[in-house]
Image (spheres, coloured by chain):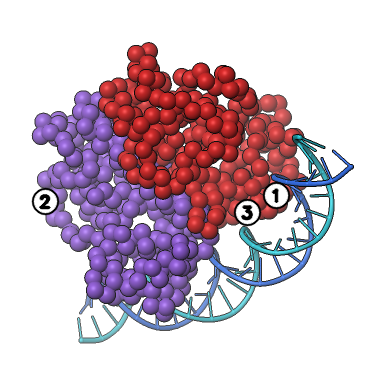
Chain colours: A purple, B red, C blue, D cyan
Amino acid sequence: MNSALHPSSLFRTATVIKWEDARRPRRAGEFFKGLSAKAMDDFESLAGHLCCPPATFLIKEDQEPISVMLVYEGEVNLRISSYAGKRFILGIAGPGEILGLASAISGTPYRIEAEARRLCSLAVLKRQDFLDFLMRHPTACQNVTRELSRQHTRTCERLRIVGLTSSATARLAQLLLGWCTEGRETGGGTEIRFLLSHGEIGECIGASRETVTRTLTDFKQRNLVEVNGSILTVPNQDALAVYAGIS
Amino acid sequence: MNSALHPSSLFRTATVIKWEDARRPRRAGEFFKGLSAKAMDDFESLAGHLCCPPATFLIKEDQEPISVMLVYEGEVNLRISSYAGKRFILGIAGPGEILGLASAISGTPYRIEAEARRLCSLAVLKRQDFLDFLMRHPTACQNVTRELSRQHTRTCERLRIVGLTSSATARLAQLLLGWCTEGRETGGGTEIRFLLSHGEIGECIGASRETVTRTLTDFKQRNLVEVNGSILTVPNQDALAVYAGIS
DNA sequence: CGCCTAATTGACACCTCTCAAGATATGTGG
DNA sequence: CCACATATCTTGAGAGGTGTCAATTAGGCG
């Protein structure tokens, strides 16, 4: 399961990789699916290897896509930001995902930011080498096309949240429901690993930090959600769906 | 130049096609770029032909992508809509564009609506035939991938407008500036062919019809825009950029 | 000429942002 | 273990902007 533009990575156990482990490429994720060993070797012969600490900016806006980066290990925030400093989180990229894929393909300047959330391990190769690689390996090209279509679908879903939903309450409910699809079902409801701050949640739905706090408090009082440390539980998704304006 | 998710089609002369002309496929647009005559014949042997009047729904939300549609001629509104009836215009598709491309590739249900703005001429083929065609013709596959990355970039730009810009004034200004890049430069400024109603503009930026009217009136009074029939002129893009919050 | 759609304008309520202050948690160093 | 620093969360009050409702006007088309 790919996690571009979607916080499925939130629900994985937060394994902190060690530097020595990070040096070993992980051939996980959508990109390597169905690739022959020969093709993988081909890829790794082209790619350099990069480890970076949390809060490293891997891509900045308006930057030319000279090189292409693929996540081996770790998590990367994908964002857009405005001149006024306002930021919007598109999603969180995990292993096997190519950062700024659309720009890498089209060659137009990046319109997103990518920032490591934790210690990350990445493959780095020249954009032209990447494009040539796709030409040599049709399977990889198909994977990339599928990945791109999935990213586009996810972005449209985010647009649905911020474009069609006027109230912050409904937006937060929709975001939580989206996360529930990746959560774990238990007797008491759906459990979500909850690693984002209120500020970051606000950046996901286009609301202020304070509004997120207030709305979440309201949800707790209505028993729509329960928070225990970094675990958020939704006892009844249908009840939450009422507030999402889906019913 | 492609116009998916972008109203560049607004700036083409509004030629109303006749039924007899519409029956003749037009091999225009991104999809056919660089394709051999043989490949084009291959495509047309697979494709049926469809003409439809304005306001025809070509795609509805949650529909399975069993068949794939390519626009030969005409204009098609691409939208998302909410259960509450609120709508958001993603863009306008023109000749050479494939409707709901992301869903067609991934096979997931359409998450958009497509509605003919005028008399349209379309190619229709089975999704599997389309995918097989892409496998046979790598050039077509590359065109599709490029098209997809462009659509994704455009969608991100829309997300930037509605997600990062809080005031309706700034959103409208940004929309107009985006259209200016496709407009015609004249002595008095940048001319834009203006075929959308205030209501539709509202659906582009997530604002109500009345707010568009008010904001546009305000812009006129400040000499930021001039409206003559269906021609909208921006005398000074820099002045408008101030209101867009870009400066 | 009348109908219908779209545009216009005003009044009002509601929601959310912003600013401000305080509380709670987490981490660091002595 | 404590003191301190930092980050995050919480809560309140006020102002501003936008949606909604309503009434009127303008324009297009048969």
**Which amino acid type is shown beneath numbered disc 2?**
Asp
**Which amino acid type is shown beneath numbered disc 1?**
Thr
Tag 3–tag 1 contact (CB < 8 Å): no
Q: Which mark is residue A21?
A: 2
When the figure is inspected, residue C9 is found, relative to residue B194, above or below; the finding is below
Left or right of B132 in this view: B183? right
Residue projecting furthest to the top: B37
Q: Nearer the viewer, residue B115 or A41?
A: B115
Q: Residue at x 33, y 37 (%)?
A: B105
Picture coordinates of residue B3 (x, y %)? 50, 32
Quadrant of residue A12 in the image? bottom left
Label 2 chain ID: A
Q: Residue at x 60, y 53 (%)?
A: B207
Q: Residue at x 55, y 22 (%)?
A: B22
Picture coordinates of residue A233 (x, y %)? 30, 71
Tag 2–tag 3 contact (CB < 8 Å): no
Left or right of B161 in this view: B136? left
Number of other residues with Cα within 10 Å of mark 2, as a class: few under 14, some 14 to 19, many 20 or more = few
- Residue B14 shows in this picture: yes
Q: Which residue is mark 1?
A: B213
Quadrant of residue B8 in the image? top right
Mark 2 to mark 3 CA distance (whole Å): 54 Å
When the figure is inspected, residue B202 is found, relative to residue B102, above or below; the finding is below
Q: Nearer the viewer, residue A132 or B65?
A: B65
Q: Residue at x 17, y 59 (%)?
A: A15
Dot in front, 1 or 2: 1
Q: Which mark is residue B208?
A: 3
Q: Nearer the viewer, residue B124 or A153?
A: B124
Do discs 2 and 3 belong to a common subunit?
A: no
Dot in front, 2 or 3: 3
